[in-house]
Amino acid sequence: MKLFTAENIKLIDELTIKIEQIASIDLMERAATIFFTKFCELFDNSHPIYVFCGPGNNGGDGLAIARMLLQSDYDVKVFLIYRDLLSLDCQLNEDNFLKLFPDKLFKYSTDFVPPIISSTESVIIDGLFGSGLSRSLSGLFFEVAQWINNSGYKVVSIDIPSGMFSEQNILENQYVVNSNHTLTFHFPKLSFFLPEVGNSVGKWQILDIGLDINVINEINTNYFYIDKSLILNKYRRRNRFSHKGTYGHALLIAGSKGMSGSAILSSKAALRSGVGLLTLHSTECNRLICQSSVSELIYSTDKNNDFIVSFPDLKNFTTIGVGCGIGTYSETASMLEKLFSELFSPCIIDADALNIISRNKHFFDLIPENSILTPHPKEFDRLFGFHNSTWSRIQKAREMSIRYKVIIILKGAYTVVIHVDGSCYFNSTGNSGMSTAGSGDVLTGILTSLLSQGYLPLDAALFGVYMHGLAADIALSCQSEESLIASDIIENIGNAFKSLN
């Protein structure tokens, strides 16, 4: 699915209006009708409804929705909050509303008088501001938003929570309405995926308001959403007459003294993800526990007992994954530099390998093109400098992916895959239970396996993060987010694959 900035969404609206030869008020009516229908599925007319409308088109949506609810026997009160003029379509909807329900509209342009709400079943509809907001809430609007957040009632936002911007969201004194539900028009907003404000969105649902599909297809964007339909197009189903050689021979360089768990988790994940053969190169001190724990792997022992200083002949391997639990020893750094200088095909780089690179920036020039780097935010900042927001981190990742021709997987609640052309893909699967030790090692194993099987690097990255999150989601059928551990993800990789069939 394509994702768009607020500027492009506005353009899509305008072109739809032009192509369909309708007035903007007609598109607003269409959006309000679809919102109204979904809202009625969530809350019946036993709930008193309080609709807060701002002076722009989001407020116009709110007035139209309130009119439809009143016409369907809902108990509704509307509060129009403004400073000066209303937008044209908001004004038209106010006029239409007043013709039918003049006693249901309360207007505030200076001092806000909070309504007295007696029913605990009351619901607030937030229509103060939409996706075009460009400055923080202040004055009367801040006061209303603060009252909504402190009210304790369920909140449903129209398109986007008021106070939230569509992209970058780090500003001094920024205040955002905290919603339980956000019913968003046609596209999720990019800010929904950002931890700084994402919790304010609540549960979000996309409402198709009939924007012109040809316009959507023609407008270029750098942002996409990884959903099941995209993944099914990437999935390489097995041939009946294939054999283990068909699916590659992967090499994992992982583990050091006390870190055998990283090597075991990544190895198990690689095998569960379908690699034909797997060699684990690790230390002598890890050999017994690794071979006892994963009988299907081939073990290559490093010449050093405690940490990795060498690697086997690379010509035997289809793909290499490196970094899980290897430490940041100077000798290991030398090994990594030599490894990169001898590699001529993409590899997977994670964990301590990333930390070593952060101390040896010239390594970037040695990394093969289309290699996949998998940093979490702190690892990313060690690599590329401190960033005060996820949005700025994503923009930096785009810059670095283009510069070094590598794929960056920026891990988080909505893991982002950044391609070498600067395009960004937000993942749709996963849950907070994945915030546990070893989850990243599992992802490295999955990615190494997929790349070894012949998936193109971008396809491996997209497919890998989706399946990683999907396996964790399936694991919640018998675990909680609190109890989930990395091994649970591995145990459900098979179920994740089965769900695609």
Image (tube, rainbow, N blue to C red):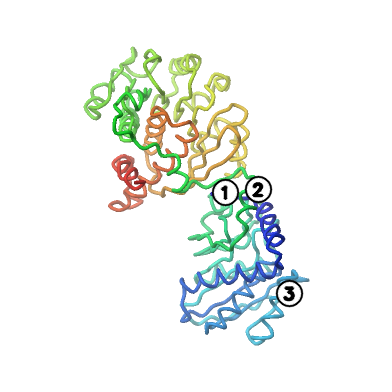
Density class for disc 3 (Cα within 10 Å; few <14, some 14-19, many ≥20) is some
Density class for disc 2 (Cα within 10 Å; few <14, some 14-19, many ≥20) is few
**What is the secondary structure assignment of the residue under circle 1?**
strand
Q: In this picture, is 428 found above or below 398?
A: below
Residue 278's quadrant in the figure?
Answer: top left
The residue that label 1 is drawn on is 2
**What is the secondary structure assignment of the residue under circle 3?**
helix
Residue at image point 40% right, 45% down: 469
Residue at image point 58% right, 72% down: 33
Task: Where is residue 63? Give x, y as percent.
Answer: 64, 75
Residue 256's quadrant in the figure?
Answer: top left
Q: Which mark is residue 288?
A: none
**What is the secondary structure assignment of the residue under circle 2?**
loop
Q: Which amino acid, mark 1? A: Lys
Is 327 left or right of 357, judged from the image as shown? left
Task: Where is residue 111? Give x, y as percent.
Answer: 70, 75
Residue at image point 26% right, 21% down: 287
Q: Which mark is residue 219?
A: 2
Query: Closer to the camera, 227 or 200?
Result: 227
From the image, state whether disc 3 or disc 1 is nearer to you: 1
